Amino acid sequence: MDIDSKLIEATRGFLDPAEGMALHEAAMEASRRGPCLEIGSYCGKSALYLGSACRCNSQVLFTIDHHRGSEEQQPGQEYFDPALFDAAQGCIDTLPHLRRALVAAGMEDTVVPIVAPSRVVARAWATPLALIFIDGGHALETVYTDYTAWVGHLIPGGLLLIHDIFHDPADGGQAPWHVYRLALASGLFEAEPRVGSLGRLRRRLCGQVPQDLGTIVANL
Ligand code: MG
């Protein structure tokens, strides 16, 4: 197994080890067919699971993050981590932590960090993807945008993974769950067994991405 458990454990993040292993296994399969993409790098914990699989197949993992922290990670919010606050800039900056993790793992030749909001990157994206992992901001608009902006780049048979799927609002925010259901309702995907809060959908071999995803939202 090409996973450095100690490094992963020492890397900040909100990912259960079983979910991490499921990410790794999904990327082992998908990266035989094409590059993988993660939305929401944070400090690199999930990139280590995904990237180690991509490295086995001499493939690339793109990982996108603006690195300013999501809504709930800002000062005064529930998931604020003072160690990630850059006083000189006056804001969160997780990029140095991601870079340190990638260097420590020897993954600079495998994992390509992209520093920007995902919707901005999507405006100029043209590379087909074998796996998309959505784990960025948890506001409904953010998760919805991460889905609609990228789903058209997923190859038939490719995997769409969505983190933090919670049925019960007491367990966590509902936006990823809503978008998971939206993806299923589109008819583009078949559900595969979930692992913890990690939803797994496989794009069917036929079917087009609808022009107007908003009508599906209205009908949910
Ligand atoms: Mg998450």
Image: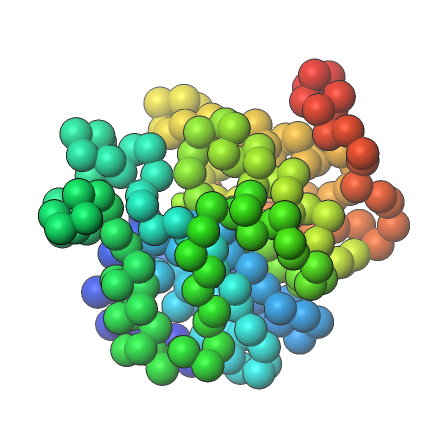
Most foreground residue, 84 or 24: 84
Q: Which quarter is ligand 1 in?
A: top left
Query: Can you say whether 10 is above or below 136 in the image?
Result: below
Q: Is residue 134 above or below residue 44?
A: above
Residue 211 x, y percent position in the rendering: 80, 34
- In the depicted view, which residue is nearer to us: 142 or 160? 142
Q: For the view shown, which residue lies furthest in the top direction?
A: 218
Which quadrant holds the C terminus?
top right
What x and y, as percent, mark residue 193?
60, 47
* Horizontal side, residue 26 vs residue 216: left or right: left
Q: How many marks?
A: 0
Q: How is the image coloured?
A: rainbow
Say which residue appears at 86% left-offset and 45% top-offset.
207
How far from the left and from the top, in percent, is residue 27?
56, 66
Q: Which image quadrant: the N terminus? A: bottom left
Query: Can you say whether 20 is above or below 51 in the image?
Result: above
Whether residue 24 is visible here, answered yes or no, is: no
Residue at 70% from the left image edge and 71% from the top image edge? 33
For residue 110, say whether it is visible: yes
* Residue closest to the far front: 88
| Residue appearing at x 28%, y 55% in the figure | 94
Nearer to me, 185 or 130: 130
Q: Residue at the location (23% across, 46% down)?
A: 92
Quarter-wise, where is residue 164 in the image?
A: top left
Left or right of 166? Residue 68 is left
Q: Relative to 209, is 180 on the left or the right?
A: left
